[in-house]
Image (cartoon, rainbow, N blue to C red):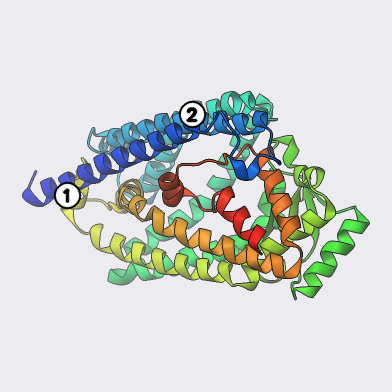
Amino acid sequence: MDAASFAFTAVVCAALIGSLVLKTVLISRQIRHVARHRPAVPAAFAETVTLEAHQKAADYTIAKARFGMLGNSFEVALLLGWTLLGGLHWLNQGLLAWLGGGMLQQLALIGCFALIGGLLSLPMEWWSSFRIEERFGFNRMTLGLWLGDLFKGAAVGVLIGLPIVALILWLMQAAGALWWLWAWAVWMGFNLLLLVLYPTLIAPLFNKFEPLQDETLKARVSALMQRCGFAAKGLFVMDGSRRSAHANAYFTGFGAAKRVVFFDTLLQQLEPAEVDAVLAHELGHYRRRHILQRLVLLFALSLGGFALLGWTSGQVWFYTGLGVEPSMDSPNDALALLLFVIVVPLFTYFLQPLVAQLSRRHEFEADAYAVAQTSGADLASALLKLYKDNASTLTPDPVFARFYYSHPPASERLARLTKA
C-alpha cells in the first residue's frame, strides 16, 4: 500500500471511529436522560399526559435507542466487511472471472451488493417491526404483508433503479471528463420525475388511497386550502392502520400532481379543527417555500457529490485505500459508485446537526403559519395527541435532540404555541 492509500485508510478509520464514538455517546445520553425523567410527568404536561402514557413513551424511546446502538455496530461491521476486509474486492473479482469486464458485470456487481446488503439487514428490520414496534402496540403488519412489501420494494427498485444506474455507468464511460455533470443532471431529473410519478404509480402498490368521504371535513379542508391559495389534485385517506398505529398527514407529488394524504389513524384521533391545524402546518411548508429550499439544497449537495465522485473515481488510492484493487483492463465505474456510497456517509454524518437545525427552524415557521391561518390551541392540542399516540418522549436529552431531531422537542414546540 502506497502512502496516499495508507493516508486515506487512516482518514476513513478516524471518521469511522469518531462517528461510532459520537453516536454511542449521544445515544447513551438519551437513554440516561429519558430514564432519569421516567418516574414523573414534566410539570408543563402534568394536566394533559398521564403517567402511564409518559412512561410508555420513555420505555419506547429507550428500547429504540438501545436497538439503535446495535444497528450502529452492525453498520460498522458491514462497512468493514465490504471494504478493508475484502468483501467488495472478492465479489468484484468473482464477477469479473465469471462475466468478464463490461456493463453486464458492473450491473451484476451493483445488484449483488444490494441483494447481499438487503438480506443481511433483514433480521434487523424484522426485529424492529415484530419485536419493538409490536411490543408497544404499533405494529399491525402480518408476516405475509411484511414479506410482500419487501418483494414489491425490491421489484420497484429493480425496475426503476437498474435503468438509471445503467445510464449513469454509460455516462461515466462515454461522456468524457465532465461525465459527472451529465450524470448529476440525469439524477436530478430522475428525482423530479419520481416526485410526479410516486403518488399515482408507486405509492398505491403499498397502500390503498381512497378519496376523503367525510363531506364536512372535506368542506373545512377545501376552504382552508382556498384561503391559503393552495391547489391539490385530491384529498385522500391512506390505510396506514394496516401496517402501523402511528399517525401522520402529508403532501405528496410535485407541481400540478400535488395531493393531500391523511393517515386513517390520524382522522380517528383528531377532531376536525385539529385536522385543520395540522393541515395548515403542512401548508406552511409550501407557503414558506421550505420544499423549494430543500430541493435547491439537494441540487447543490448532489452536484458537489457528483463532482467529488468524478475526481475520486480516477484516483487509485481511493480504491486501494478501501481494500479494493481496481481492474487494469476493464471499467471500475461500478466499484467507484459503490465505494463512494459506502464511505461518504461517514463524513456527512458530522453535518447532521446543521441539517436538523434547518429542519427545526422550518417546523417553527410552519407552526407560525398554521397559527395565523387556524388556531394555535387546536394545533397544540393535535400535536399533544400525536406525541402521546406515537409514544414520543417529552423529555429527550437536549444534546441528542439538537444533533438529531428534525422536529423541535415537544416542550419547546408547545411552549411557543402557547405563547402564540
Quadrant in which the N terminus is drawn: top left
Q: Secondary structure at mark 1?
A: helix
Q: Nearer the viewer, residue 357 or 320?
A: 357
Specify few, some or many for label 2: CA neighbours under 10 Å numbering under 14, 14-19, or 20 or more. Answer: some
Residue type beneath disc 2: Met
Residue at the image point whose x is 46% and y is 29% from the top = 67
| Residue 358 in the image: above or below residue 65 | below
Instruction: Give coordinates of residue 180: x percent, y percent.
Output: 35, 66
Instruction: Give coordinates of residue 7: x percent, y percent.
Output: 12, 49
Specify few, some or many for label 1: CA neighbours under 10 Å numbering under 14, 14-19, or 20 or more. Answer: some
Instruction: Give coordinates of residue 264: x percent, y percent.
Output: 78, 44
User: Does residue 87 appear anywhere in the picture?
Assistant: yes
Marks 1/2: CA distance? 31 Å
User: Does residue 119 appear anywhere in the picture?
Assistant: no
Query: Left of 111 or right of it: where is 198?
Result: right
Q: Secondary structure at mark 2?
A: helix
Q: Nearer the viewer, residue 376 or 198?
A: 376
Instruction: Give coordinates of residue 348: x percent, y percent.
Output: 34, 54
Marker disc for residue 255: none
Q: Earlier in the sequence, mark 1 or mark 2?
A: 1
Q: Which residue is mark 2?
A: 124
Query: Left of 389 or right of it: where is 349?
Result: left
Q: Nearer the viewer, residue 136 or 15?
A: 136
Q: Nearer the viewer, residue 410 or 135?
A: 410
Residue at the image point whose x is 34% and y is 45% from the top = 342
- Which residue ends up furthest to the right in the rendered image? 215
Q: Quadrant of residue 200?
A: bottom right
Residue at the image point whose x is 87% and y is 60% from the top = 218
Residue type beneath disc 1: Phe
Marker disc for residue 8: 1
